[in-house]
Image (cartoon, helix red, strand yellow):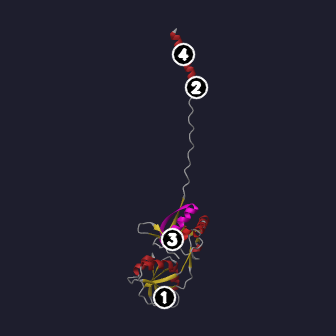
Amino acid sequence: MKRLLFVAALVMGLALMGCQKEPEKAPEKAAEKPAAEEKVLVNGIDGGGFPPYAFVDKSGKTVGFDVEAIEWIGQKMGFKVKHQPVEWSAIIPALEAKKIDMICSGMSATAERAQRVNFSDPYYTVTQVLVVKGDNKATLEQMLSTGKKIGVQRGTVTAKYLEELSKKPGMKFKLVQYDSTDLSMQDLPIGRIDGSGMDSTIAKEVLKKDEKMKIAGTFDAAPENYGYAVRKDDAELLKKINEGLKLLMADPYWAELKKKYDVD
């Protein structure tokens, strides 16, 4: 009898277990979408260094007026900036080949360059000058008409101007081209060249470093405006840069930058 009761109880228990629902599984969480990464744009700067606008300091950090300006603009307009040194004479081809996204490095917005790139609104104006040793008594006209050697950085507005000037009647000077203005300024004190042509803004930095140098005169060339360059088909980036530049020039930080880098 006990055996029959035990079997009946076992059967009823199994029946009850079969009626119970399996525990529900916790719903799987939907895969979380990764946060959108901030866009990184590559800014091409003069590989030879162009203080105070864009250069690599002794610690290896890229600094300068334009470097900090475009980084500020990027923060406001939603992109990060990476700086890439490029040989100046090849910097526009690098932009066209999409190796860089913009040029924010003290570039003169000339009509010739504007045929290949689009420039932002201007933010600075420069002239072209000739730097010589302080004890040089010759005038600018004498330097250009007496067979002197004049150094210049290739690919610059000053280089193009001097190339054209050298073909004019009465001009008797030999043009010596360098990869950077710094290299020409290494040769000037030791007499390999007699003068070095450059933007007035570069000359200002040169005279700060070496009081034995001076400006012999300003070339008879129209003043040039600096602007930031982008590819012809990059209208969206140009719009962002112009909007950001407008905000920056209205912000107290603009005056701080000009004071920090001694930009008039």
Q: Secondary structure at mark 3?
A: helix
Q: Viewed as shown, does residue 85 lie left or right of 123?
A: left
Residue that carries the numbered disc 4 in the rendered image: 9
Q: Nearer the viewer, mark 3 or mark 2?
A: 3
| Amino acid at the residue labelled 4 | Ala
Q: CA distance from mark 1 to mark 2?
A: 103 Å
Residue 140 badge: 1
Residue 235: horizontal and vertical position, in percent?
61, 66
Looking at marks 2 and 4 on the same chain, the residue that comes earlier in the sequence is marked by 4
Question: To which quarter of the image does residue 189 belong?
Answer: bottom left
Q: Secondary structure at mark 2?
A: loop
Q: Nearer the viewer, mark 3 or mark 4?
A: 3
Q: CA distance from mark 4 to mark 1?
A: 118 Å
In contact (CB < 8 Å): disc 4 and disc 1: no
Q: In this rendered view, identify the residue nearer to me: 222 or 148.
A: 222
In the image, the segment drawn in magenta is 64-91
Residue that carries the numbered disc 3 in the rendered image: 65
